[in-house]
Structures are given as structure tokens and as C-alpha cells.
Amino acid sequence: MKELAVTAAFAPLVGALIAGLGGRWLTRQGAHTAAIFSVLLSFLASCVIFWRVLHGATFNETIYTWLTSDSFRFQVGFLIDRLTALMMIVVSFVSLMVHIYTVGYMADDPGYQRFFSYIALFTFCMLMLVMANNYVQLFFGWEGVGLVSYLLIGFWYTRESAVYAGLKAFLVNRVGDFGFILGIALILANFGTLDYVPVFQAAPKAEAPMTLICILLFIGAMGKSAQVPLHVWLPDSMEGPTPISALIHAATMVTAGIFMVARMSPLFELSETAKSFVIIIGAITMFFMALIALVQYDIKRVVAYSTLSQLGYMTVALGAGAYSVAIFHLMTHAFFKAVLFLGAGSVIIALHHEQDMRKMGGLRKYMPITYWTVLIGALANAGIPPFAGFFSKETIVEAVHLSHTPGATFAYVLAVAGVFVSAVYSFRLVFFAFHGKERFESHHDDHAHGDVKPGEAKSHAAEEPHHEAMHGKPHETPWVVTLPLILLAIPSVLIGGLTIGNMVYGDWFGSAIQKSQVMEHLAEEFHGALGMMGHAVATLPFWLAIGGVVLAWFLYIRRPDLPAVIKEKLQPLPAILEKKYGFDDFNDWFFAGGARRLGTGLWAWGDKTIIDGIMVNGTARMIGLFAGAARRMQTGYIYHYAFTMIFGVFALLTFFWLYLQKL
């Protein structure tokens, strides 16, 4: 098991080093071969580990001790149980699909080798995070995915928007990480160890501030898993290439926070207040981020806000004490969200990097494979049975309904409403991009055919400087793009119904995840996947999901004129959604602007006035004044010096005479 674990974790690191340091001696084909083979090796090792874990094997050992300070040991170690094995399979498989997809998507990019190095390194950091058996290694992987996400989001560093998005992601995550490392420090101070198992065993009887520890740890999760108000970095991360959008949003960075809270479930079960904090934050993120997706026209941003909403569902499940359900939704979401992102990327390739859905339409007949896979992803995201997302999302709604965590009622109402909104924005994307009138005609090179005046062509090009003119109709993308879509679409259909019985309601996770009363109540009502689908027909969430699909069809296929009318009637709500509730504006004004104003003030009053004006230049001016006064006394005339001497002697004599008089 040890050799397999080391192989699974470190193979992507070797691939990243080969692809990144190969330079001119390694061709583009060599770079992607090294990266893909390394991740494939990691996936195969993960599969073997998963098989062994299913048959009862576990592993919890130290691999390397890198620092000893007094009685504290900082180690690299792996804890492999069913939770870890599941995460290893999901991370390595989705990463492998993204690596293969990247061969087609980034084919003409000059940073081809650098990109493969980054995504392989990203996979290594995420695997180190999920396989950790101690908080130090957890923090290493945590910071590693944060660093590589900064490099990948700002991959196209010549674009100012990409640089801004990368910095935004990095800085917002530093806020969350500050809380996270404080939580780890409190664990070390109260338990005297940084290994998971001793902490979990001692926690129930320890006199430690568990509420504070759990909230600080969750603040870290709020940054990584993009929960309000630390969610603002995730939509802007769309500035990175589409493959990394899929990798970050589906299986790696954003799921790190969800995994961490599930792993820390023995601690969170000791604090009702912390769970209440978690469920309320998750509910707000879940519903209000879904509403923003309704007004987005950038196809990647629609999927990005969908990710925010689905992460909110996972967080709500954690707050309800349904940790296994949160991990179950994490797994199903990883597949169908990867399909949606990679499908969006396939459309972007076919339309020569056009991302505005208003310039799409009618793509179904040109891109059938992309269409059907995206449709599967949308059905799963909307929670329509029998697709994977239905089982996980429906279970979350039921778990929140049964939960006694303070705030659960609030979360349940928003969760049910969120089902409707999810269906609307999911099928708004499908109908906008693949159905209806073809709106990409205006993007052809019409000027070459004499259809557009030179001034008009120039004006249009000025609006979209990074878009090339299309020549001919769009067509299906190459197999390196469509094959990962198909392989990800299959589990998006099947994996929910096949695994829900054992993973959610059985003893599948064993001691890896803390059990709660909510799961016991849910298990009493579960009668198999088919029974769940049959029962769903009589529930409100099912009909809300169907209603959302029908409403999207009516608004964007039957009456495409109505959305503009509704938008006008509902003002100012659409404007608030388009402004994203003002989070970005507030952050730019208060935090970014405040930092600039503070810096300007410190420079103007501190540096310029006090240091330069008084201490440096002021001292120099004072010395100059004294020197000027002394210079005037040096006249060169003897009678001036004689007068000064006589006056001085007279003054001294007067002083001594007065002093003697007092005596």
C-alpha cells in the first residue's frame, strides 16, 4: 500500500517537472505525453488502492519526517481510508480527462508545455491534500493548490484581466487561509499534536474551544470552496483557459474545503454553533449565487456561478450533519460539472473563442456529441432523475429538512427554491447555445464577401479584439476534446443511482466520516434508487426542477422576446444581479481602494511630511540655518573679532559677579 500511495501522489509531480523543465529538448508532444502518462499512472494506482480499501485495507503511516522541534514532529504521511480513496479516484480521473482534453484545446498556445506542467503540479498538490494524515501536510497541499491556481488563472499573463483575476484569487484565499492556519495553531496548542487520529480521539473529552477552532477551519474552507463573502474570486477565475476552469471547479481546489470539513467531522459534531454557521453561509451561497447565473451571458460564467451554487448545496449538507451526502454530491458534481465546463470549451473552440451566448444558437446540428454531453450535464445539474445530480441534490434537500441544526429551516427553503433556479439557468444555457436561431452568422468574415462596409467591420473588430472571424459553419471538435466529454458524461448518468445505497445510507465510509442522527433518519426513509425516483414524483423539488426546464424552454425557445420584457419590469433586481450584489464594487472601494488610500496617506503624511520633510530635509535645513548664521559672524574684520571678545569677557564677568552676589 505504501508504494502505491507514493506512486499515486508523486507521479504527477514527476510529470510536472519533466514537462516544465524539459525546455527546448522536450517537444510539445513530449510534454503532454509525460504529463498525461504521469496522471494516468496516478489514476491506476488510485484504482488499485480503491480496490484494496473496498476489501478492508487501510493505511496510516509517516512517509518522511522533515522537521523536529522540541516534542513536535512535522511529517509527510498518508491516511488512506474510504474517504481518501474516493477522493483519489475522483481527482485523478477528472484530472486525466482534463489533461487529454487540453491536447486539443491548447494545441496552438505558445505556453503549451508550461500549461501541462502547471496542471500536473495542480494534481499533485490536490492529492497531497486529500491523502494527508496531519494538518501540516494538509496545509501544504492547501497552499499548493492556491499557488498553482494563481499561476493557471493568470496563465495568459499578457491580458490585464487575467493578471487581475489571478491576484484576486490569491488575495481572497489568503484571507481564508489566515483563519485556517489560526485554527491549526489552536489545535496544536490544545492537543499537542498535528496528527488527525490523536486529535479526533481526544476531542470529545478535551477542554478546547471547539466552536472557535471549527469556525476558523471553516473560514479556510470559505476561501477555497468560494462561500459568501469569500466567493468573489471564483467567477473571475474564468480568465484562465477552459481546461483549468474545469479542473479547479469540478474536482480539485473548490472541493478542498468540502473535503476538509468532512474529514474534520469528528470536531464539527462537537459544536452546534459551528454547524449553524456553516449551514447559513452555505444556504446564502447556494441560492443567491444561482440567481446571478440567470443574468450571465458568458457561457463559462454561467457554469461558474452554477459551481458556486452547487458548492453551497454541499456546504449546507455539511452544516446539517450529512457529511456523507456532501461527499456524495461532491463526487457526482465533479463529473457533471466537468462535462459542462469542457462542453463549454468545445463550443468556444468551434466558435473561435467566442464566449457570449447571444452569438451562439443552433449548434445542436453542428456539434451533436458536444450537445448531448452538455445536455446530460445540464440534466444532472438541474436534478432531473435518473441523472447523478438528482440523487445527491434530492438527498441534500431531505437531509436539511430533517436537520435540527439552528438555521436548517432557512436553508431548506432556499434549497428547495434553488432547485427551480438551477433548472432554469442550466437549460437557459442549453437553449441559448444549442437551440433556436443561429446567431453566429454575424461573426463570419462578411467583409471579404462585400456584405459589410469597411467602417462597420472595423467597429465590430474593435468591440471583440480577441475574436477571429469565422470561415464557414462551426463543426464538431476533435476526438481529444469529445472523448473526455463522453467518458465524463457516462458517470454523470449512472454513478448516482449505482452508488447512493452503499455510499450514503450504508456503512461505506466507516469511521472516516462521523455519523449523525440526520443520516439515521434518512436511512429509514430510503428504499433503493428506483424507490427514490418513484417517490420524487410526489415531491415539490421534482416538480420545481421540471417547471424550471419548461420555463427556460418557454422563455428562450417559444417566446424569446419575453426575457427582455421581464428584465425591464423587474428592475432594479436584474441590475443588482448583474452587479453581483455589489460585492466586487464594495471590495474595490473598501479593501482595494482603502488600502490604496491608506498607502497614499502613509506616504503623504508619514514618508513625505514626517520622514522626508521633518527628519531628513528638516534636519538638513536646520543645519543650513545654523551654518548661515555662523557664516555671517565670520566677517574677516579684526575690530569685529575684538569687539566680540571684549563683549564676551564682559558677559562672563557680569555672570560671575551676579553669581557671587547670590552667595
Image: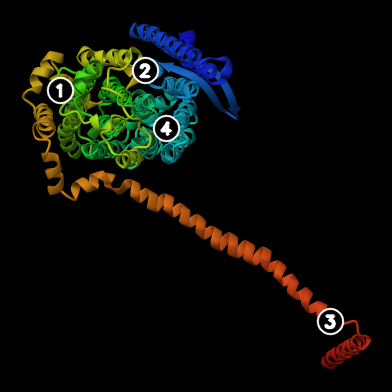
Q: Secondary structure at mark 3?
A: helix
The residue carrying mark 2 is: 101
Dot 2 amino acid type? Tyr
Pick whichever, 197 or 284, lies toward us: 284
Give the crowd class for mark 1: few <14, some 14-19, many >=20 residues within 10 Å: many
Dot 3 amino acid type? Met
The residue carrying mark 1 is: 384
Which quadrant does the N terminus fall into?
A: top left
Q: Mark 1 vs mark 2: which is more N-terminal?
A: 2
Q: Position of residue 504 (x, y in %)?
A: 24, 19
Q: Mark 2 vs mark 3: which is more N-terminal?
A: 2
Left or right, 503 with respect to 199, comes to left
Which mark is drawn over residue 633? 3
CA gap between label 1 and label 2 equals: 27 Å
The residue carrying mark 4 is: 153
The reply to whether callout 1 and callout 4 are in contact (CB within 8 Å) is: no
Q: Position of residue 378 (x, y in %)?
A: 21, 24
Q: Secondary structure at mark 4?
A: helix
Left or right, 339 with respect to 26, comes to left
Q: Position of residue 404 (x, y in %)?
A: 20, 34
Which of the 4 quarters of the picture holds residue 494? top left
Front position among marks 1 and 4? 4
Q: Residue furthest left?
A: 538
Give the crowd class for mark 3: few <14, some 14-19, many >=20 residues within 10 Å: few
Front position among marks 1 and 2? 2
Front position among marks 2 and 4? 2
Q: Residue furthest bottom?
A: 661
CA gap between label 3 and label 1 equals: 98 Å
